[in-house]
Image (cartoon, rainbow, N blue to C red):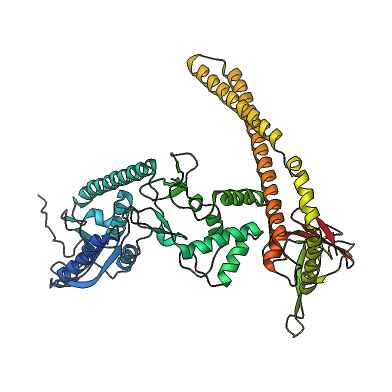
Amino acid sequence: MAKVITIPATKSRFTADPSGSRKKRRVAAYARVSTDHEEQQSSYEAQVDYYTNYIKSRDDWEFVSVYADEGITGCNTKKREGFNTMVEDALAGRIDLIITKSVSRFARNTVDSLTTIRKLKENKVECYFEKESIWTFDGKGELLLTIMSSLAQEESRSISENCTWGQRKRFADGKVTVPFKRFLGYDRGKDGNLVINEEEAVIVRRIYGMFLQGRSPYAIAKALTAEGIPTPGGKENWSGSTVKSILTNEKYKGDALLQKVYTVDFLSKKKKVNEGEVPQYYVEHNHDAIIEPSVFEAVQKQMALRCPGKNRQSCVSIFSGKIKCGDCGSWYGSKVWHSTSKYRKTIWQCNHKFDGGEKCATPHLDEETIKELFVEAVNILFTEKDEVIQNFNAIKDTLFDIRELENDRVRLQEELNVVAELIQQCVNENARIALDQDEYQKRYDGLAERFDGVQARLEEVNRSITERQAQREKIEMFLAGLERQDGLLTEFGEDLWYSMIEYVTVFNKEDIRFTFKDGTEIRV
């Protein structure tokens, strides 16, 4: 009969250390709190202090570090720098054991939790969860861990849904909140509502004024940066997008649109612009306005008029996108002459002057000449301003009449409603009755095509109405400024240039025409 001899294990199957080894285990701890509120700050500090003392009190353990994340969600590991650094150190062989308070402190995402623990286990790093008394090298550890991680994830989902419900209830009740530390022009009042900060409100009003003068968001951002005015977030450099967000935020006229964005997934915390997926709430007259509603609406119309690809303005210089070549119709661009000498100067010439076989004959202009000619053209306009204003007032109602367009809009909206109803009837009928599917699809496609066509015409009519209204308001603002001007102009001013000039056309040195915002053309 064969004899079986048992050869006992001499090494740990988890750490590969000899059995009975007195080698100290290198131990680290992980601590996390999910918010940076004061009450959780004490919990965070207590966790760090507790684990430091706990590890150092063991003779068989060697203290490595306490890795920590403060004010970070546990739903994913992407932004948890302390956690990720700890895992990197463990995989690099600097840690043998990781201790943490509970599974939920480690991660509320089941997949993240199990993936990380398996990766650590493969590299002979054990984890210990104190609250649940789970050691990951234990045979039952992974089963218990899967159950506890799932419970932690479900708890996170429940908390997220409760928070979302509470936030949407606040929106439905018309309660407005903004990130006050990064919101220019308003402070938090005693009742939690928005109260005007007069020092910052001056900057907001100036941004709106500069835009209505003719400056683009990028040009405004450039000017504010040059003056050293801090951004809403306290940074030095303004961007065009920051200025644009101020120009389009309805809160500056005293109203508030709530739930502009929403959280798509509680695990990833990914946010998405609300395009109709969840309800929105518009609160009128919620707080004191910094910008008059009429001014705000004028800015929105001008914004629509200056959409990308159409009337888009270049803002490298105040003259960019303002000077046209009379030969080919292209814009003038700047060139620097004698850039490294005392004779350095900037000139403007047609961007396509030397393109193709036949070059444009239009001359170049230096900046001083442009400024002098502008002053001359404005002074000619000032002498004729009464006639210009009178002529505009006589034709403005006819020139900018939108009654026919508004009638078209009403008719198209009614047709759109009718077609939408026919589509719904078609779908319902197919659901109730066994129709020939080829016939049904043909009928449905025909109605859908008709709906798209009507909608496209409606959008075009709306765009035409907006453009006509914006053009009228732009000319009225220009003429109001012209009427206020007293006496002749003695020197060039950027504000006047932006507010008065539509573009300049250069034909030759004796024929340069300034087209003003009301369409008046003056040759100098």
Q: Quadrant of residue 479?
A: bottom right
Residue 248, percent across and down? 54, 52
Report if residue 15 is visible in the image: no
Residue 41, percent across and down? 25, 64
Taking depth in this image into account, of 316 and 34 the one nearest to the observer is: 316
Question: Quick check: 421 left or right of 505?
Answer: left
Residue 467, percent across and down? 68, 45
Question: Quick check: 5 left or right of 296?
Answer: left
- Residue drawn at 56 percent across, 68 percent down: 224
Question: Which quarter of the figure is the C terminus placed in?
Answer: bottom right
Q: Is residue 316 above or below residue 149?
A: below
Report if residue 128 is visible in the image: yes
Taking depth in this image into account, of 280 and 456 the one nearest to the observer is: 280
The furthest residue to the bottom = 342
- Residue drawn at 13 percent across, 72 percent down: 57
Question: Quick check: 343 left or right of 203?
Answer: right
- Residue drawn at 67 percent across, 63 percent down: 315
Taking depth in this image into account, of 489 and 373 the one nearest to the observer is: 489
Taking depth in this image into account, of 215 and 70 the one nearest to the observer is: 215
Residue 126, percent across and down? 23, 61
